[in-house]
C-alpha cells in the first residue's frame, strides 16, 4: 500500500510529502462523507482561453505586459450569475466546492489590499469570490478555496525570473511572499463566511497553521492528503484523499479543441473513487462571459440524474473489504453492514430481468437486496409483471435475479451503472 500512496503523491502536480496531520480526524470523516466536490477554475486569462497561469513561464515581456495592461479592461463577465452555478451544482449532487481565489499568476479573484492585480481593477469591478461563496452557501453547498502560495506577480515585482517550483520562487525562500500570502489568507477567511476546505497548490509553509487558527474545523486537502490529478489509485487507500478531474482536457476555459468525457465516464470515475476510499472533485471552467460552458452543464446534469436515483450509495460510504471484482465496484455505508454493489456492465434496459453473481459479498438470514432507486414492486404499464428481486448464496457466490423497474429516460435505456443495496452483509470465508 505504501507504493500506491507514493505513486499518488508523485502524480500530484505539486505535492508535499511531509504532512503535519493537522486536520481533525472527525472533520476528515466529515470530508469523506461528502463524496463529490466541484472545482471552479476561473481567472483573468479565461479571456484568451489559455492554460491557466502556466503560460506566463517563458513568455516575453510583451505578453506579460498584456496580462497586466490589456486583459483587465477586457474582463467583464456580463453573464455571471453565480446562483445559477450553485443551483446546477446542487442538482448534480455536489456537496462541496473549491474556487480558484488565486492561481499561480497571482491575480486575485477577490478584493484585496495586498495588490492592485485583482478583480476590482478590471472592467467587472466586482468581488466574484464574495458572490460565488454567498451563492453556494445559500444553496447548502459547503464552500472551499483553491489558493496558490506560488505567486508569479509577486516574483516578477521582486525581479525574479519565472520558473515553476524552483528554489528562488517558493515561499519558504521568500519571507516577503510568505507574509503576503498570509495576509491574503486572513482576508479570505475574514470576509467570505465559513470556509470548510482549502486546496494549497504549492508549498504552504506556515499557511496551514494560519488556516487552522482561523477555522480549526477546516479540512486542508492538498499538502495534507493525496490529491491525484487525472488519475486514480490502483486499490483502496487507507486515508482521506480526493481525485481531481477536468471534464475535457483543460482546467481553465478553452474555447476550441476540447474533447469531453461522457457523462457515463464521469459517473464511473466517481464510483471507482468512492470504492477506493476517496472523493471525486470534478472541474468546471467558466468562460469570459461568466458562464459555465453548455457541454459542461449537460455533463453535470447527467451526473445529477444518476445522483438523484443513486446518491445513497455515494454519500457517507467507505470501502468494502475489497474495491471491486469483475463487473462490480463496492462501497459500504459508514458504520453499518449495508453494502452497495455497482454493476458496471451497462446498459440495462427498463423491464429487463438479469441474473448476476457476486463473489465478494455474503448474505445472512436478515439480508434484503434491492436495486437502489426503485421499490421493486411495480413495472410501469405492466401491473402483472413479476418484479421481485430474488437471491441465494452457494459456494460460487451470491446469486441475484432482478428486474430494473426505475425509469430515468423515456427511451427506457440506462447507460449508467445499476446498484444493488445488500443489507446485513458479511465478508466471504475464502
Image: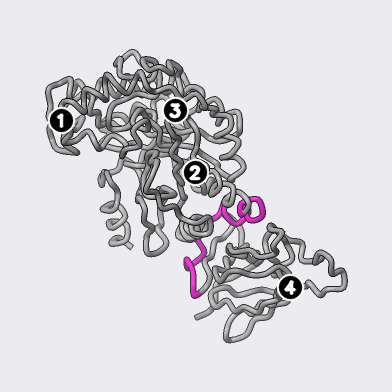
In front: label 1 or label 4: 1
Give residue 19's position: percent from left, percent from top: 30, 43
* Whether label 1 touches label 3, CB < 8 Å: no
Query: Is the residue 106 above or below the residue 27 in the image?
Result: above
Q: CA distance from mark 1 to mark 3?
A: 41 Å
- SS at mark 3? loop
Q: Residues within 10 Å of mark 3 (few under 14, many from 20)?
A: some
Q: CA distance from mark 2 to mark 4?
A: 33 Å
Q: How busy is the neighbourhood of tag 4: few (under 14 within 10 Å), some, or many (20 plus)?
A: some
Give the labeled residue for mark 3: 215
**Is 4 inside the magenta-drawn segment?**
no
Q: Which residue is mark 2?
A: 37
Other residues around mark 2 within 10 Å, as few (<14) / some (14–19) / many (≥20): many
Name the residue: 61% across, 51% down: 307
CA–CA distance in space, label 4 to label 3? 48 Å
- The CA distance from mark 2 to mark 3 is 20 Å
Image position, residue 168 (x, y; %): 12, 32
Work out whether residue 381 or residue 20 is closer to the camera in this orientation and state it. Answer: 381
Q: Quadrant of the N terminus?
A: bottom left
| Residue located beneath label 4 in the image | 389
Residue 175 lies in quadrant = top left
Q: Which residues are magenta?
A: 306-326
Amino acid at each position: 500500500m505504501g507504493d500506491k500512496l507514493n505513486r499518488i503523491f508523485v502524480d500530484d502536480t505539486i505535492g508535499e510529502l511531509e504532512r503535519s496531520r493537522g486536520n481533525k480526524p472527525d472533520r476528515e470523516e466529515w470530508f469523506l462523507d461528502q463524496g463529490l466536490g466541484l472545482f471552479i477554475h476561473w481567472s483573468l486569462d479565461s479571456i484568451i482561453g489559455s492554460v491557466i497561469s502556466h503560460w506566463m513561464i517563458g513568455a516575453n515581456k510583451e505578453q506579460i505586459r498584456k496580462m497586466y495592461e490589456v486583459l483587465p479592461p477586457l474582463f467583464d463577465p456580463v453573464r455571471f450569475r453565480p446562483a445559477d452555478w450553485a443551483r446546477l451544482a446542487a442538482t448534480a449532487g455536489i456537496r462541496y466546492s473549491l474556487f480558484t481565489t488565486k492561481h499561480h499568476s497571482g491575480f486575485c479573484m477577490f478584493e484585496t489590499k495586498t495588490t492592485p492585480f485583482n478583480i476590482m481593477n478590471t472592467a467587472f469591478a466586482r468581488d466574484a469570490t464574495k458572490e460565488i461563496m454567498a451563492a453556494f452557501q445559500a444553496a447548502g453547498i459547503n464552500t472551499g478555496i483553491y489558493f496558490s502560495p506560488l505567486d508569479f506577480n509577486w516574483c516578477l515585482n521582486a525581479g525574479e525570473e519565472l520558473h515553476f517550483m524552483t528554489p528562488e520562487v517558493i515561499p519558504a525562500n521568500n519571507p516577503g511572499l510568505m507574509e503576503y500570502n498570509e495576509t491574503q489568507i486572513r482576508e479570505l477567511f475574514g470576509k467570505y463566511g465559513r470556509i470548510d476546505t482549502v486546496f494549497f497548490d504549492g508549498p504552504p509553509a506556515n499557511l496551514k497553521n494560519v488556516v487552522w487558527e482561523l477555522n480549526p474545523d477546516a479540512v486542508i486537502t492538498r499538502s495534507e492528503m493525496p490529491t491525484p490529478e487525472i488519475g486514480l489509485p490502483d486499490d483502496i487507500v487507507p486515508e482521506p484523499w480526493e481525485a481531481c478531474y477536468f471534464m475535457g482536457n483543460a482546467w481553465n476555459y478553452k474555447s476550441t479543441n476540447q474533447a469531453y468525457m461522457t457523462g457515463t465516464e464521469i459517473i464511473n470515475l466517481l464510483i471507482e473513487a468512492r470504492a477506493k476510499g476517496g472523493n471525486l472533485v470534478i472541474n468546471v471552467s467558466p468562460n469570459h462571459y461568466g458562464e459555465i460552458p453548455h457541454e459542461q452543464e449537460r455533463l453535470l446534469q447527467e451526473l445529477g440524474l444518476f445522483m438523484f436515483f443513486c446518491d445513497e450509495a455515494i454519500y457517507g460510504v467507505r470501502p468494502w473489504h475489497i474495491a471491486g471484482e469483475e463487473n462490480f465496484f463496492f462501497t459500504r455505508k459508514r458504520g453499518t453492514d449495508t453494502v452497495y454493489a455497482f454493476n458496471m456492465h451497462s446498459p440495462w434496459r427498463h423491464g429487463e430481468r438479469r441474473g448476476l453473481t457476486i463473489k465478494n459479498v455474503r448474505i445472512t438470514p436478515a439480508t434484503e437486496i434491492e436495486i437502489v432507486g426503485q421499490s421493486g414492486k411495480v413495472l410501469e404499464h405492466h401491473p402483472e409483471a413479476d418484479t421481485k428481486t430474488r437471491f441465494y448464496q452457494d459456494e460460487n457466490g451470491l446469486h441475484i435475479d432482478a428486474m430494473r423497474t426505475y425509469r430515468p429516460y423515456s427511451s427506457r435505456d440506462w447507460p449508467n451503472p445499476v446498484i444493488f443495496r445488500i443489507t446485513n452483509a458479511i465478508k466471504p470465508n475464502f
